[in-house]
Image: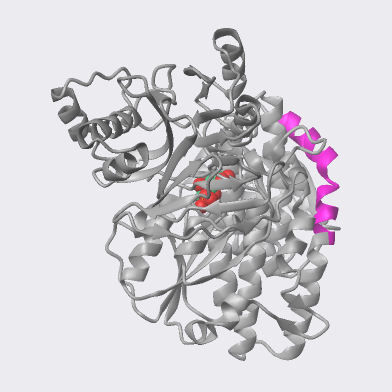
Amino acid sequence: MCGIVGYIGHRDAYPIIIKGLQRLEYRGYDSAGVAIYDGKGINLAKTKGKVEDLKKKSKETISVEGNLGIGHTRWATHGVPNDVNSHPHYSNSGDLVIIHNGIIENYESIKKELIKRGYTFHSDTDTEVLVNLIEEVQKTENVKLGKAVQIALNQVVGAYAIAVFDKKKPDELVVAKLGSPLAIGVGENEFFIASDASPFIEFTNNAIYLEDEEMAIVRLGKEIKLRKIKDDSVAYPNILELQMNIEEIEKGGYDHFMLKEIYEQPRAIKDTYRGRLRADLGVIKMAGIDDHLDKFLNANRIIIVACGTSWHAGLVAEYIFEDLARIPVEVEYASEFRYRNPVIHKDDVIIAISQSGETADTLAAIKLAKENGAFVFGVCNVVGSSISRETHAGAYTHAGPEIGVASTKAFTTQITVLTLIALKLAKEKGKINDSEFAEYLEELESVPGKVEKALESNPLIEIISEVYKDSTNCLYLGRGYNFPVALEGALKLKEISYIHAEGYPAAEMKHGPIALIDEQMPVFVIATKKGHYEKVVSNIQEIKSRKGKIIAIVTEGDVQVKELADHVIEVPETFESLTPLLTTIPLQLLSYHIAVMRECNVDQPRNLAKSVTVE
Ligand code: F6R
């Protein structure tokens, strides 16, 4: 995880790096550092804490002037978060300085070897080992920095996105990638390096995304040279023109990115189906599916692999694929799937879901499925991400950048894409007729408006949040399509407010969790009109008779649950399979408000990072 930023050109590097690191803090925020070349030497400052702390420290302790620099925001893997373990790291001579996102797995054996050769180490990090290995290669092989990086990387096992420079040659930056993302922004005789394009989007729309096992020597006044790390052969840069704009990555008047992203959902859902759903023509057009329709129609089964919130979206998809298209579906945690020797057939279709497109376990699951001959389809948000490139085909969610660490619009747009796919397959397989299909398309088109309506409950949700903000435990219950929503609601609460929460299928209550219920226990129940309504009402009665506090998400106009529950939050009526797109909204808002009231850092919850690029 971690975010990296670098700059070489004619502007002051420091403000670009600091602002860039702030935009990348979603990737890790336990420590940060910066190194600037000022024309004579390297000025380096680093500290435990956030980029804001780094800003203070660097202004007080170093000269920040210079046109070449690198910076890092860290999510610790090797070594506790402290000043010394923060990046950048110097080599022993003090000539080289490096930033690194990833893990060098064989660093201990390399470190032992370097110690024998007289190297000393100040930190516990794998990164300090790497920069000294590069220095050792430079010395022993008498090669330039680029070549030394290439030779050194051939000796390491692991994942990396690195940027390194040599103060003896301050007109170049060397970068390399394997497993962690690295983008190069290409300006007019200036270059930007970053984990994603957000640090440089106001300077240039032109970007090169390095492929795995590629490196680049970025030199002022020269064209970028790309090389394959394995054999030093030339690789050709593919310069993409980015569509992202600066407004998308700023808070736009909201207090937090999470709130902004919750409110963006009507627009995001629309963007997801825009150009794909044509209710007027009665068709769904999705190139990724159209080009491989036979794979889906002849699939033995669909296996969905994902982690966290994306896994919850996969669970919703399981219901809708089986319900509408009658294709058997299994939903797997990517982290389990990759290690449990799963049975994978050539006629299985794997759907990998990932907002970031960088999740290490999901990537590994994809590779395993491909090795076994399965067709792999990706559902990603981040364009050009590793998963979008690793899969045979895919569909983007088009949610726009999601910066709050807790996924919100990623979840609803993933469900939207998966619903489009399920509907398309249902139609192709003749499982629904033309008029049912047309009704579905029409209803899906009404969802953004209904999400807007659901968002209108925000003031009520704020009041309810005040009542439950000091709870220590919460239960979330749902059935059918809303069981995954219960899981997702519980995840949202625990990750940003640190309240223990569990999601359960409502009927499972009596097999254990009911023992927890007393007057202290808030129980959030999704009880919309369709989908086992009467059965959920019985479950609510069971909670009530044990004095649990009931907060119910109900369909507009509900009377039955209103009589039983302590609080009700209404959402508009829709098809049962589309209810997750609405019922999840109040649960997102609830966890947001509770976290704010508990003074938690909503956008950057402790111990978490947005892209989990380590296993
Ligand atoms: C929860 C959350 C995580 C991610 C998970 C997978 O709010 O954000 O659980 O859903 O780390 O990430 P992606 O979707 O990027 O693969």
Q: Is residue 254 left or right of residue 89?
A: right
Taking 227 as reference, is 95 above or below it?
A: above
Residue 518 in sight from this viewpoint: no
Indicate yes or no whether the magenta region holds residue 531: no
Q: Identify the main secondary structure in magenta.
A: helix
Expressed as whole percent of the image width and height from the top left, the position of residue 278 reads 78, 79
* Identity of the residue furthest to the front in this view: 221
Q: Quadrant of residue 316?
A: bottom right
Region of the chain picked out in magenta, as a range: 449-467
Name the residue at 70% across, 42% down.
203
Q: Quadrant of residue 449?
A: bottom right
Taking 60 as reference, is 286 above or below it?
A: below
Expressed as whole percent of the image width and height from the top left, the position of residue 1 reads 46, 39
Residue 543 in sight from this viewpoint: yes
Taking 544 as reference, is 277 above or below it?
A: below
Q: Is residue 529 left or right of residue 484?
A: right
Q: Quadrant of residue 242?
A: bottom right
Name the residue at 80% across, 70% down.
445
Name the residue at 83% across, 82% down.
280
**Number of numbered callouts drawn:** 0
Taking 357 as reference, is 407 above or below it?
A: above
Q: Which of 507 and 226 lies nearest the eye of the viewer?
A: 226
Q: Which of 147 and 552 lies nearest the eye of the viewer?
A: 147
Which colour style is shown?
one colour
Indicate yes or no whether the magenta region holds residue 463: yes
Expressed as whole percent of the image width and height from the top left, the position of residue 211 reads 45, 56
Q: Which of 283 and 111 lies nearest the eye of the viewer?
A: 111
